[in-house]
Image: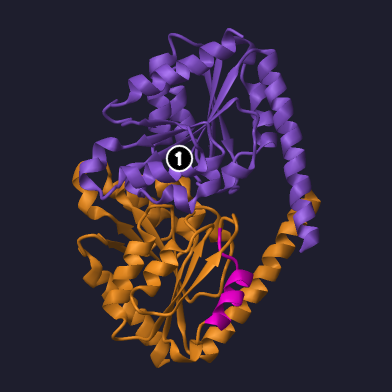
Chain colours: A orange, B purple
Amino acid sequence: MTKSVSVVENILGANDRIAEANRQLLDSTKTYAVNFMASPGAGKTSVILRTIDALKDRYRIGGIDGDIATTIDADRMAATGIPAVQINTGGTCHLDAVMVSGALPKLNLDELDMLIIENVGNLICPASFRIGSHLDVLIASVPEGDDKPYKYPKMYRGVSAVLLNKIDMLPYFDFDMDYFRKGVEALNPGLAFFPVSARTGEGFDEYLQWLMEQVDSYLGS
Amino acid sequence: MTKSVSVVENILGANDRIAEANRQLLDSTKTYAVNFMASPGAGKTSVILRTIDALKDRYRIGGIDGDIATTIDADRMAATGIPAVQINTGGTCHLDAVMVSGALPKLNLDELDMLIIENVGNLICPASFRIGSHLDVLIASVPEGDDKPYKYPKMYRGVSAVLLNKIDMLPYFDFDMDYFRKGVEALNPGLAFFPVSARTGEGFDEYLQWLMEQVDSYLGS
């Protein structure tokens, strides 16, 4: 038992070192990397596409898309006109720093202000693997239910913001916003929180305002 | 690289042997085990509660509930009046055979015809770990989107049935049923498929009829 714990620690230790190298590479080209994580079907790709659409005239944006199979999402990213790279994890339930370090050289980072990374659809594994991103955002969604912070605490603890997507569906679901918020707040006090709908665009102004503040602050530093 | 693959194979080999032992234990007491898997928020617990409610007068049912944290779902199972055991995986993204072998002795299997196992909310990891169940059921849901079979193929390949939950939400989502079915059929031809709503009960008659046939066939064998 002790042995297997120490193996895990070594793997995570190695991952963290490579994540740090990824971060240094991104900093050397002044590229701000945002890592979007979510359960399958929460709307990661839709939120990302709307984000790219709103910001692509302001920043030079590139994308990395992680999936266990297919290039559906990277194709959708590339269709917005930005350079995009697909990582197929071959079944692995998260991106790790090594995968990202293999993808970074495929983008011309010198010409990017912002890198949007779509992690593998999973509410558990990505929380354990740093990849070198400057900002980690969790996209929750109304149909998933209001109990998810309580049931997947590690993911909620490790992020800088939560977007609650599909709020246009609130009338059709029994979703207790206070219960949800209370769970988030207990795990990650003061966390930035944005209720949005990637379908209607509701809430995007506030979220994008906040996101631009993070990017501008980084680029101006 | 070769080394790490062989480690994974050993772990999975050991897991399979323990899964086989779990199956033998269940067979020795003639207890039919059904393993429900799904993404977070697809409605596993709601489907299971409705299933228990419909079948608990017909079979003696017990439950095992897997979660990375909390006993919310096992508490809900136990509230139906059946014996239920919680497995907290401590962050691990799936149940494995060892965890289940630790939980089985906590139930009086001699007095159970049917064991309902709720796996950890995850569309990737549980597909790789047999636990000894007789039947593996995947619960998809309309809000997740119609592309999930394409993006999470392993999970769809390994199961005996797919329930598509939350069909009462079809009017509010862009969900192409043909596209979804075509993906499922390509991965797992002839798979039992039941569109249901755990909220309204729609589709449960057909699904329960099929499930009872599986259980009866096992118990009568």
Element class at badge 1: helix
The subunit carrying tag 1 is: B
- Left or right position of A217 against B158: left
Where's residue A167, x and y in %? 24, 54
- Left or right position of B161 against B166: right
The image quadrant of residue B21 is top right
Amino acid type, label 1 = Glu
Residue at coordinates 47% horizontally, 53% vertically from top-left? B151
Where's residue A149, x and y in %? 42, 50
In the image, residue A74 sits, relative to residue B183, either above or below, namely below
Whether residue A99 is in magenta: the answer is yes
Which residue, given by chain and number where applicable, does mark 1 sit on? B185
Residue at coordinates 54% horizontally, 41% vertically from top-left? B157
Residue at coordinates 62% horizontally, 81% vertically from top-left? A21
Please say whether residue A175 is visible from this viewpoint.
yes
- Left or right position of B177 against A199: right
Residue extent of the magenta highlight: A94-106
A200 or A154, nearer to the observer: A200
Query: Which quadrant: the C terminus of chain A?
Result: bottom left
